[in-house]
Amino acid sequence: METIPSTPAFALTGVAKHFGDVRAVEGLSLTAAAGGAIALLGPNGAGKSTTVSLLLGLARPTSGTVRVLGGTPEEAVARGRVGAMLQQGELMPELTVGELVGFVRGLYPRPLPLSEILDLADLGSLAKRRAKGLSGGQAQRVRFALAVAGAPDLLVLDEPTAAMDVESRRRFWDGMRAYAAGGRTVLFATHYLEEADQHADRVLVIARGRLAADGTPAEIKATAGGRLVTFRLGDQPAAGLDALPGVTSVEIRDGVARLRTDDAARTTAALYRGTTLEVHDLEVSGGHLEDAFLALTREP
Amino acid sequence: MLASYVRLEILRMVRNRRYLILGIGFPLVIYLLNANVFGKGTTDGGVALSAYVMVSMAAYGAISGTLVNTAGPWAQERASGWLPQLQVTPLRGWMIIVGKLVGALTLVLPSMLLVCLAGALTQGVSLSAGQWAALVGALWAGAVPFVALGLVVGSLLRPDAVQPVTMITMLGLVIVGGLWFPVSAMGETMRSIAEVTPAYSYADMGWSVIAGHGVPLPDALTVAGWAAALGVLAVLAYRRATVRA
């Protein structure tokens, strides 16, 4: 029996966004199935915030189309199906946390119960405080509360943990995971690799306005060449290294050989047993998202 | 949605000390000072000066109140990110503009009523109930173009530029409009200029009511014309400020 594919949470097709001569986003195409946490990972200036603005209808693409929950971004926002936490956004200083959350909640057709919102954002004790006296991390949690208040199908968070301390961050991610667990889609933009690695089901890596990789954190690590085997080669010939099992690329610099491999164990075994080379200072590194990230986003 | 946005706007302004002092207290103090300076005479038309000055100062309070309370906060909300935050909720752009308008009109009412009350209680201004109602009604409804002007200024300028520009605009309007020095004391040219400005026509509706003539149609049309023109400008400026280029 054929299953009917559900409407994607969002889909970008050949999207470009130029600001004058600056090409913030260029030829970006991606589709996100509904449900789960998606990280939009990239270095500063990669086009993350522009992509977020396009998804929220705050910016229109120079070319290409953006669809959110089956309609235009403006339609999705107007119907209350999208909630967002933007990078910058002061709260009205004269209002209390409870008033702000209550107001935004009232704008949506099917909001979460107030108590659940305050729980998710860990704000229970702050409800009566005016926004003016909040710390940076507290204000950030209020903004998270405003984003989830309407129980949106798509929750978009742009660099959500900026200004949060370690404890706030931990609680914030707990709240985010709890929200995504209800079958909703959460997209968060970040330049912190460990956030993408630990909290996303899927990672979209963007660099220079283009999609550089798309997959689970494990897949991203694998596609970017897995691990790195390095050793001192000295004057010995490098011929045959690229034929070793698992090796995807070979680089020799200053007498040091760097082998990218998707199977470090077989590569090192073959290096000792299958060659006559004298192997000094052998190191195996990588397998971290960070290496993959650097490999994927470095300048060509 | 619109109602809760208006309620939020009013709630935050009522808690704002700046609004309470500049928006409500200041026009009252200025009126009491002026009323005592101008004394007990009558105008050429035989209207008590205390009543004439009361209308001038109520109009002045409404113009400065709507401009100051709209332009500054609006520019601030754009720059601080509160507006983009509203834009990603189901609250639509037109609701934000209408909400600002209704909020500003509500917030200007207390200062207007206080000036009238002070006129009646401390300056012996005596009008019929119908005149009081017509006066407050005309000054209230006639404040729309000044709210729109505040939105235009707040949409086009950065927060630090808003205050001086608002002050200069407001002073220009009330001086040229004859709210501080009656137009009868102006030369012919200045008087013809005054009569097409929104501030003169606005206050003249009030002066005419207290002289027992009702609201003159040309004044009402001038104010309505300004309201329409500035309203369109406010919408265009809002679109520019929230550019979806």
Image (spheres, coloured by chain):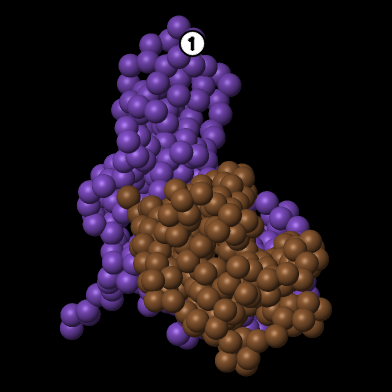
Q: Amino acid at mark 1?
A: Asp
Q: Is residue B239 visible?
A: no
Q: For the view shown, which residue lies furthest in the top direction? A: A235
Q: Is residue A48 above or below residue A271?
A: below
A143 left or right of B89 in image: right
SS assignment at label 1: loop
Q: In the rendered image, which quarter is residue A55 located in? A: bottom left
B3 left or right of A267 in image: right
Check the rendered structure and report the hue given to chain A. purple
Residue occupying the point 32% across, 71% down:
A75
Residue occupying the point 47% across, 35% down:
A294
Residue occupying the point 33% across, 65% down:
A73
Q: Which chain is brown?
A: B
User: Which residue matches tag 1?
Assistant: A254
Chain identity of mark 1: A
Q: Nearer the viewer, residue A65 or B214?
A: B214
Q: Is residue A194 above or below residue A130?
A: above
Q: For the view shown, which residue lies furthest in the left direction? A: A1
**Residue A89 point in image, percent of width and height:** 58, 57
Q: Nearer the viewer, residue B142 or B239?
A: B142
Q: In the rendered image, which quarter is residue B173 located in? A: bottom right
Residue occupying the point 27% across, 70% down:
A71
Q: Is residue B106 above or below residue A163?
A: below
**Residue B142 point in image, percent of width and height:** 50, 73
Q: Is residue B176 visible?
A: yes
**Residue A97 point in image, percent of width and height:** 69, 72
Q: Residues within 10 Å of mark 1 (few under 14, many from 20)?
A: few
**Residue B94 point in image, percent of width and height:** 40, 71
